[in-house]
Amino acid sequence: MTAHAAPPADRPELPAAWAAKLLPRRGRRTGTPIEFDPDAPDLLAEQFEVHADLLQQLFHMKKNRRHRESVDAFAAGEPDFRGAVAVGELLRHVGPHTADWWTRLEFQAWVARHGLPWAIAALIERYAIQLHGWYTEGVRPPLSHLHLTQASWYDFLTVNRDLDSGFTAEVRATLAAASDDEYAAVVAAAAEHRDHPAKRFAAMLLLPTETDWVAEACAEYGGMRASSATDRVLYHSVEDPEHLATAGITEMATYELELECIAALADSLGTAALPVLAATRESEWFVNADTRRHLVKAIALLPGDAAAAYLVARLDELLHLDGADEAALRNPAAALRTVAD
């Protein structure tokens, strides 16, 4: 169960349906940590045996041969990051298991055998690559043509898949529940694997407490961003409006803008989210009716005078009138000061 501490004065108290879309964050919001299966290493080893013939086919490909030695080392029990990541990504999608089942089994096996710090470092490495080639999810591929490439900044499939499945939330809940000593060991291990923009991006998502890392990843993001599909990572990680500014985000991308992103931004930045929320509401791009309602509600949820003033100044629009009503119920003093002015 997720426990929510009372929000700071500049953070909104979100409705339960909105709060359910937030990720755990160490020191602010707990969650449901992973329940580790002690048999996970043996179960993962069994999967390597089941798919041994397919692996050999994949290693016939010139692009995959460089992974063979590392995969063999990891399968033999050595803490080989490259092997762990390569074999996992090659076999994650081939069935009959689901990719999400494999991800959870793999991570539990990593922790059981090598410890949480090692597992988080391996996860950072995994997020920097992805599988390339034709395959049907959960079905053993008929041809041995799959190979590993660098993660695409257009969609960052590995990161977005784990966010969608809830796995990222489970990992961040596990980190939120870790002891101070174990968490410090995780941070130290992760620091050794932040040698590429994609890895720094992944480290920001998993360890948003490291604000210097967040700032660095955001500063790089503007030059790497290829679509809005990865913006959600920032909304779940930042705590300073300057982080978004350095990433080049002054408004949210309105195409298929999900409530998750709006809720995460409001929670992460609190009152400082107002300029971005307002710019998105007033975007020259199409904003559908549901999204407009969510944006206005998010503004109404923000404490302080600025959000109330924004809504009161736009009472000629029904949505803003509804928002002003909600803001007055939540922050009557701010609403009265705004009207008096």
Image (cartoon, grey):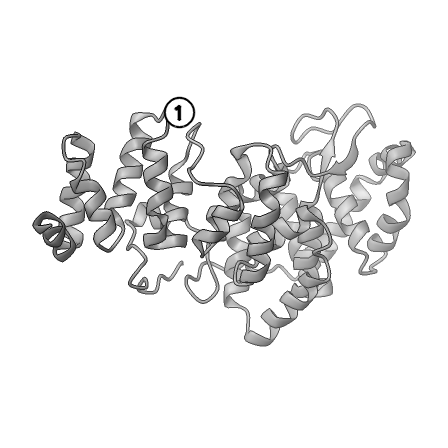
State whether residue 109 is above or below residue 231.
Answer: below
* Residue depicted at x 86% and y 37%: 64
The percent coordinates of residue 169 (x first, y second) are 50, 52
Q: Is residue 252 left or right of residue 89?
A: left
Q: Nearer the viewer, residue 70 or 196?
A: 196
Q: Is residue 278 left or right of residue 327?
A: right
Q: Is residue 65 visible?
A: yes
* Residue depicted at x 65% and y 64%: 116
The percent coordinates of residue 199 (x first, y second) are 68, 50
Q: Residue furthest front?
A: 341
Q: Residues within 10 Å of mark 1 (few under 14, many from 20)?
A: few
Label total for image: 1
The percent coordinates of residue 181 (x first, y second) are 60, 76
Q: Residue furthest bottom?
A: 181
The percent coordinates of residue 171 (x first, y second) are 56, 56
Kindly identify the amino acid type of the residue bearing the numbered disc 1: Trp
Identify the element where label 1 is drawn.
Answer: loop
Q: Residue furthest left?
A: 340
State whether residue 209 is above or below residue 143.
Answer: below
* Residue depicted at x 37% and y 25%: 284
Quadrant placement of the N terminus: bottom left
| Residue 122 in which image quadrant | bottom right
Q: Is residue 106 visible?
A: no
Q: Nearer the viewer, residue 111 or 294?
A: 294
| Residue 149 in which image quadrant | top right
Q: Nearer the viewer, residue 166 or 139?
A: 166
Q: Which residue is mark 1?
A: 285
